[in-house]
Image (cartoon, helix red, strand yellow):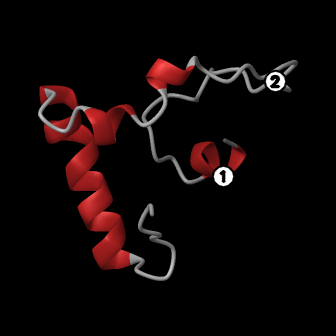
Amino acid sequence: MKQLDAAKVFPKPIVTQIVPLDAFYPAEDYHQGYAEQHPENMYIAVNDLPKLDNLQKVHPELFVEKK
């Protein structure tokens, strides 16, 4: 945040609080692998699949195909 503010990336200072995470709760099983189970969902098709394609092209060393 300090770097972004110093670089004047945004016209106003960032006011989002960054705080430690107290706990993490995994989502229920039916939420796991949602994009794989619902590739026809418009949100997945428009937002997620293009990002995955781009990740594979730009950083193939980071992309891992799920088995």
Q: Residue 15, percent across and down?
A: 62, 21
> What residue sits 29% from the left and 35% below the top?
37
Q: Amino acid at mark 2?
A: Val
Asked where in the image residue 21 lies, by quadrant, the reply is top right
How many marks the image carries: the answer is 2
- Mark 1 = which residue? 3
- Mark 2 = which residue? 19
Mark 2: which secondary structure?
loop
Considering every residue shown, the one lying at the far front of the view is 67
50 relative to 19 in the view: left or right: left
Mark 1: which secondary structure?
helix
- Rounded to the nearest angstrom, the CA distance separating label 2 from label 1 is 17 Å
> What residue sits 44% from the left and 38% below the top?
10
Q: Residue 38, percent across and down?
A: 23, 32
Tell whether label 1 touches label 2 (CB within 8 Å): no
Asked where in the image residue 43 lies, by quadrant, the reply is top left
